[in-house]
Image: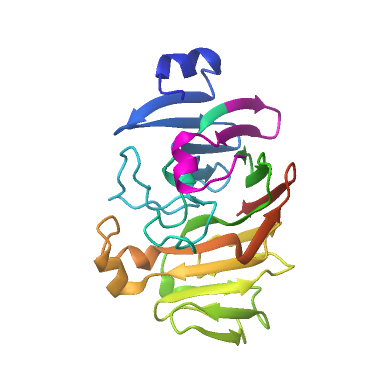
């Protein structure tokens, strides 16, 4: 793995645009492009900041109590849930939301065009991953930083047998006040409430006055985070069968050691996901899920 800062700086020599540094035990990449600033970590291929310069504000929420240790998930930004979403169906003792978010990816390439900086990272099955999930795979993660942000996960089945995955691009969005925030574009879409285990149809815009943990059927239209006196955020997804929306509210926020007690007031998760039956891939097949974020 590319643990050496000097090796990364030598291989990806774009000194005015790309910088590498350590934060805690982890390697972080800082992007300063004409259209946006961004930060991501090699562990988990985890974006923690995206600031379009025409907005001059971060679109992502990051907990100030996040842990930057090897093998520990960062709270906030855009974690990757893979190859399972939530708890493993085969062994509840395995890591929540899979092992990709706690694994170190290799930085495969950086391409800079007039419009975007494109980053590609790879995670390939290895001795440690096979202990957790007995399949040979390649997971390709691509970021496109520009006036908008695109995040893509491509799963390749390198095994001799079919396998199934569930997954999510688990984006935490920064908002001004959850009490004055609405999610538009969900009307008449069915959802499963993970708190009550009941299924319903959304009647109007989704507003918040308590904990929300719902899995919606994927919308064909973009969703919009609407806030009073704030820039609207538009979210589009491709290759996903679900949209997960989560806010822990007060009690659950207070119960999480890496989450500020009042942090629920300024964040909402909107996740592009393949849940339930997920995606089944035959040997040699691949599948891509994508989330596009613009303000």
Q: Quadrant of residue 53?
A: top right
Q: Quadrant of residue 177?
A: bottom left
Q: Which residues are magenta?
A: 108-137
Instruction: Give me the residue at 48% from left, 61% from top.
Output: 90
Q: Position of residue 51 (x, y in %)?
A: 51, 44
Whether residue 104 can be seen here: no
Quadrant, the C terminus: bottom right
Say which of 34 and 5 sits in front. 5
State whether residue 148 is above or below residue 176: above
Q: How many marks?
A: 0
Whether residue 99 can be seen here: yes
Instruction: Give me the residue at 39% from left, 63% from top.
Output: 266
Say which of 147 and 26 sits in front. 26
Say which of 122 and 264 sits in front. 122
Instruction: Give me the residue at 40% from left, 62% from top.
Output: 92
Instruction: Give me the residue at 42% from left, 69% from top.
Output: 247
Q: Position of residue 134 (x, y in %)?
A: 53, 46
Residue 187 as seen in the image, left or right of residue 45: right
Residue 53 as seen in the image, left or right of residue 26: right
State whether residue 227 is above or below residue 288: below
Say which of 156 and 21 sits in front. 156
Q: Position of residue 70 (x, y in %)?
A: 33, 37
């Amino acid at each position: 793995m590319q643990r050496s800062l000097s090796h990364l700086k030598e291989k990806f020599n774009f000194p005015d645009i790309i910088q590498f540094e350590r934060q805690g035990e982890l390697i972080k990449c800082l992007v300063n492009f004409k259209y946006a600033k961004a930060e991501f970590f090699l562990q988990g291929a985890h974006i923690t900041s995206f600031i379009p310069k025409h907005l001059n504000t971060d679109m992502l929420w990051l907990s100030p109590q996040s842990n930057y240790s090897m093998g520990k998930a960062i709270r906030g930004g855009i974690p990757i849930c893979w190859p399972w979403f939530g708890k493993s169906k085969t062994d509840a003792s395995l890591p929540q939301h899979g092992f990709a978010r706690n694994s170190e990816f290799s930085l495969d390439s950086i391409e800079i065009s007039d419009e975007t900086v494109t980053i590609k990272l790879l995670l390939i099955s290895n001795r440690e991953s096979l202990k957790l999930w007995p399949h040979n795979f390649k997971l390709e993660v691509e970021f496109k930083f520009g006036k908008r942000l695109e995040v893509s996960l491509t799963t390749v089945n390198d095994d001799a047998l079919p396998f199934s995955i569930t997954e999510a691009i688990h984006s935490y969005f920064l908002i001004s006040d959850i009490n004055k925030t609405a999610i538009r574009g969900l009307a008449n879409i069915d959802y499963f409430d993970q708190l009550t285990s009941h299924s319903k149809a959304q009647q109007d815009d989704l507003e918040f006055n308590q904990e929300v943990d719902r899995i919606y059927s994927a919308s064909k239209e973009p969703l919009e985070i609407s806030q009073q006196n704030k820039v609207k955020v538009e979210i589009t997804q491709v290759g996903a069968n679900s949209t997960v929306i989560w806010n822990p509210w007060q009690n659950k926020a207070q119960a999480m050691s890496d989450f500020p007690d009042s942090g629920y007031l300024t964040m909402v998760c909107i996740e592009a996901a393949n849940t339930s039956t997920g995606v089944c891939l035959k040997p040699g097949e691949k599948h891509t899920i994508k989330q596009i974020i613009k303000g």
